[in-house]
Image: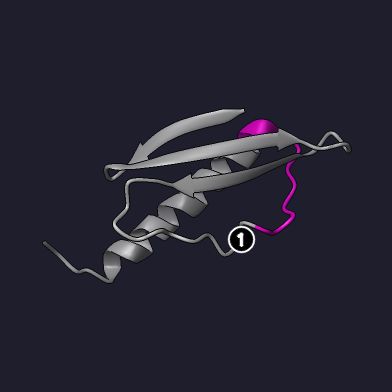
Amino acid sequence: MKYEETFYGHRIVVTTERNSGDRWTSTVEVLDTPQPIADPEQDSATEFLSEADARRHALSRAAGLIDRARQGRGKP
């Protein structure tokens, strides 16, 4: 399933998928950024028992990536 969220004005697209072992995985895309934000965990095979856990983990990763990108710019 695809979910679209917003964090500090950045669009985040979270995709969750159920694998063959009835476990859930997630990927995240951060849109509307001046530079693409890469997720170092994107290729990891982290699995979760529920879709909600997988989604929450992806949102947390995206928020961390956005926060780290904002730190480099400083205060406006």
- 1 and 24: which one is in front? 1
Q: Residue at x 37, y 56 (%)?
A: 66
- Amino acid under label 1? Glu
- Give, as a single range, the part of the protein colored magenta: 43-52
Q: In this view, does 50 lie to the left or right of 20?
A: left
- Quarter of the image for the C terminus: give it: bottom left
Local crowd size for mark 1, using a 10 Å CA cut-off: few (<14), some (14–19), many (≥20): few
Secondary element at tag 1: loop
> Is-magenta flag for residue 53?
no
Disc 1 target residue? 41
Q: Residue 67: percent from the left, percent from the top?
A: 35, 59
Q: Residue 46: percent from the left, percent from the top?
A: 72, 53
Residue 10: which quarter of the image? top left
Q: Which residue is drawn at 14% across and 65% down?
A: 75
Q: Residue at x 59, y 37 (%)?
A: 15
Q: Is residue 31 left or right of residue 76?
A: right
Dominant SS of magenta comes to loop
